[in-house]
Image (tube, rainbow, N blue to C red):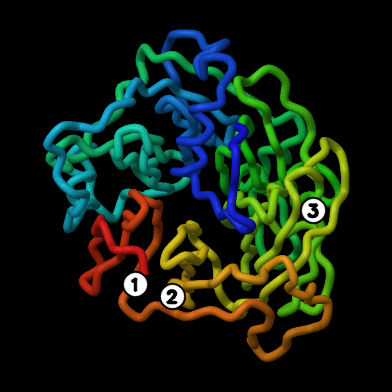
């Protein structure tokens, strides 16, 4: 993607990057794709690129699949995406109960405005991955993947698919081989774990897929822990342009916010991110979007225990790096506002320039889907 001009700080969500990238593709987005059945061992995160291409992560297989959805036009007469108890509706479609579902990710197709959901039917190793989307009446429907154009990128340096123990608990690092993805310009950006000693990694995979090289190992300073870390995976991130330089904003568990230039994502390299905020401990970041309002660029960060944070990005380039301990669950760096009317948000994505689509847990425990005005 090349644009003629960008503001000095232009934050780009998956929605607008996909639209911009669609203009700039020299080759068709479906180049190199073959038609056939697409299957997953696991499903999520998901993100959209140009021409309705959906990128779907399969962490268990350590792979990204690009799928030509052919969903490239807005649905005429489609209702606004507001669905109470969408978990009940999905459960009915899949023939199960809401407590046997996990919604792993949600993404809005910028070409059509339709909401897509990466879901697991069941729990544990026996869970079945399913891709759904909303029809024009906002009813969930299974996306037929039996005969679609697709291509696949397999990560060459993913961690092994096996349980490991640190003496306190066991986990399978393969399940975090891909923790978040985004499309930017002509690349699929991938965060997760690798099999390297410095296992926290980012990748910038050129699209259409041809070759996939090893990831870039990332070291960060974690103020709440008072040390540099190399093995904690990114939980959610967004690409953005700072001046004329593409960067990433990445959030980690417990909750450092880190900035790093995309140009440093060189295969096999070891780089150090710049921690620009500590947003509080005992917290897991869930999802992140960026948008523009009233002439300013803003970041919305949904969290497991600290609500949705609205963070102004003005002056981010002058932010000092945090390299000293931030004790007692304190905060430091970029200021933020916690949005009291955005409680229970588990997933969010931009719908358009003025609205976001969110998945939120209600007081009764049901999962609702709603379009909300950007604050």
Disc 1 from disc 3: Cα separation: 32 Å
Does the image show residue 8? Answer: yes
Foreground pick, 141 / 318: 318
Query: Where is residue 215 shown, x and y percent of the image?
Result: 77, 39
User: Would you name the residue on which mark 3 appears?
Assistant: 218
Calculate the distance from the C-alpha at mark 3 to the C-alpha at mark 2. Answer: 27 Å
Work out whether residue 63 or residue 190 is closer to the camera in this orientation and state it. 190
Quarter of the image where one finds residue 354: bottom left
Residue 119 seen: no
Element at label 3: strand
User: Which mark sits nearer the N-terminus, 1 or 3?
Assistant: 3
Q: Answer few, some or many: residues within 10 Å of disc 1's Cα (few below 14, many 20 plus, some between 14 and 19).
A: some
Residue that numbered label 1 is attached to: 342
Q: Disc 2 or 1, which lies upstream in sequence?
A: 2
Contact, mark 2 vs mark 1 (Cβ under 8 Å): yes
Q: Gap in Å between the C-alphas at discs 2 and 1? A: 7 Å
* Callout 2 secondary element: loop
Element under label 1?
loop
- Is 130 or 321 nearer to us in this picture? 321
Horizontal relation, residue 79 to residue 242: left or right: left
What residue is pinned by disc 2?
A: 307
Residue farthest to the bottom, as pictured: 328
Q: Which mark is residue 42?
A: none
Where is residue 276 drawn, in percent x and y? Answer: 71, 71
Q: Are marks 3 and 2 in contact (CB under 8 Å)?
A: no
Residue 375 located left or right of residue 17: left
Q: Residues within 10 Å of mark 2 (few under 14, many from 20)?
A: many
Residue 44 on image: x %, y %: 48, 41
Instruction: From this view, report whether residue 368 is shown above or below residue 336.
Output: above
Q: Quadrant of the N terminus?
A: top right
Q: Residues within 10 Å of mark 3 (few under 14, many from 20)?
A: many
């Amino acid at each position: 993607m090349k644009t003629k001009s960008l503001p000095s700080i232009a934050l780009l969500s998956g929605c607008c990057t996909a639209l911009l990238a669609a203009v700039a593709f020299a080759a068709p987005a479906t180049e190199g794709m073959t038609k056939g059945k697409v299957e997953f061992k696991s499903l999520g995160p998901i993100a959209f690129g140009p021409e309705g291409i959906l990128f779907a992560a399969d962490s268990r297989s350590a792979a990204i699949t690009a799928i030509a959805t052919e969903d490239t036009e807005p649905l005429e007469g489609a209702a606004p995406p507001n669905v109470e108890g969408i978990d009940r509706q999905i459960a009915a479609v899949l023939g199960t109960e809401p407590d046997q579902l996990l919604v792993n990710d949600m993404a809005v197709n910028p070409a059509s405005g339709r909401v897509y959901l990466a879901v697991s039917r069941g729990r544990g190793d026996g869970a079945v991955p399913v891709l759904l989307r909303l029809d024009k009446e906002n009813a969930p429907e299974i996306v037929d993947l039996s005969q679609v154009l697709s291509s696949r990128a397999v990560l060459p340096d993913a961690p092994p698919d096996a349980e490991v123990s640190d003496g306190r608990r066991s986990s399978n690092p393969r399940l975090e081989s891909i923790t978040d993805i985004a499309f930017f310009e002509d690349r699929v950006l991938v965060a997760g774990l690798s099999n390297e000693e410095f296992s926290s990694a980012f990748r910038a995979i050129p699209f259409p897929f041809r070759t996939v090289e090893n990831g870039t190992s990332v070291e960060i300073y974690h103020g709440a822990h008072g040390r540099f870390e190399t093995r904690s995976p990114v939980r959610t991130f967004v690409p953005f342009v700072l001046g004329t330089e593409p960067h990433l904003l990445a959030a980690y568990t417990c909750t450092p916010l880190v900035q790093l230039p995309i140009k440093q994502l060189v295969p096999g390299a070891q780089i150090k991110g710049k921690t620009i905020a500590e947003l509080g401990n005992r917290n897991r970041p869930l999802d992140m979007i960026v948008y523009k309002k009233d002439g300013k660029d803003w970041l919305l960060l949904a969290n497991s225990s600290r609500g949705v944070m609205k963070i102004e990005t003005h002056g981010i380039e002058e932010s000092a790096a945090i390299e000293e301990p931030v004790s007692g669950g304190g905060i430091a760096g970029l200021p933020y506002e916690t949005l009291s009317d955005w409680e229970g948000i588990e997933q969010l994505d931009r719908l358009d320039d003025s609205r976001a689509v969110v998945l939120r847990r209600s007081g009764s425990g049901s999962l609702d889907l709603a379009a909300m005005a950007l604050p």
